[in-house]
Image (cartoon, rainbow, N blue to C red):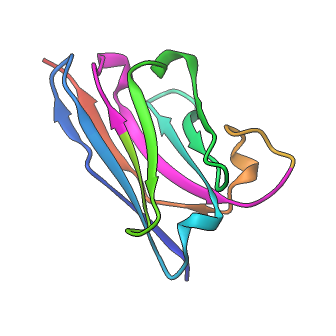
Amino acid sequence: QLQLVESGGGLVQPGGSLRLSCAASRFTLGGYRIGWFRQAPGKEREGVSCITSSPGTTYYTDSVKGRFTISRDNAKNTVYLQMNNLKPEDTAVYYCAAGRREGWGPFSASGYAYWGQGTQVTVSS
């Protein structure tokens, strides 16, 4: 079964940084669009960032622009989300997802077929 595994979450103070990783097993991420989503308690899941398979176009939701950076290392079969200047409102479970379905926006969950189990990010002093 195809799997995605997130790592890198944790507790960080406001203004701090974390780097999330999304690693794949049994398939190659390079041919997929990869999205990062998050869900905070009591809130709906929202798209945070996305990187396409080729040419690697990136997308960010407005609230993270200038603070988060998505990148991919095809040699390591891993996608990263570098998160800087974290804020308490960034607290959520973060999920990565992989998809190849056409016709869906970068933050539409319907465009993704595979999902990880999530990693908790908590921003608090």
Give the position of the N terminus as an image quadrant: bottom right
- Magenta-drawn stretch contains 73: no
Quadrant of residue 44 in the image?
A: top right
Residue 59 left/right relative to 101: left
Task: Farthest residue to the front: give it.
Answer: 55
* 64 on left or right of 56: left
Q: Position of residue 25 (x, y in %)?
A: 45, 77
Residue visible at 75% across and 50% down?
110
- 80 w.r.t. 2: above or below: above
Foreground of the two, 72 or 4 = 72
Q: Nearer the viewer, residue 74 or 19?
A: 74
On screen, 83 above or below 113? above
| Residue 24 horizontal side relative to residue 103, left or right | left
Give the image location of residue 81, x and y in percent: 39, 42
Residue at x 69%, y 39% (from the top left corner):
106
Q: Residue at x 67, y 54 (%)?
A: 54
Q: Vertical placement of 113 versus 1: above or below?
A: above
Q: In the depicted view, which residue is nearer to us: 32 or 86?
A: 32
Q: What range of the chain is rendered magenta?
A: 82-102
* Residue 20 left/right relative to 104: left
Q: Which residue occupies 67% across, 37% down?
A: 107
Expressed as whole percent of the image width and height from the top left, the position of residue 15 reads 21, 17
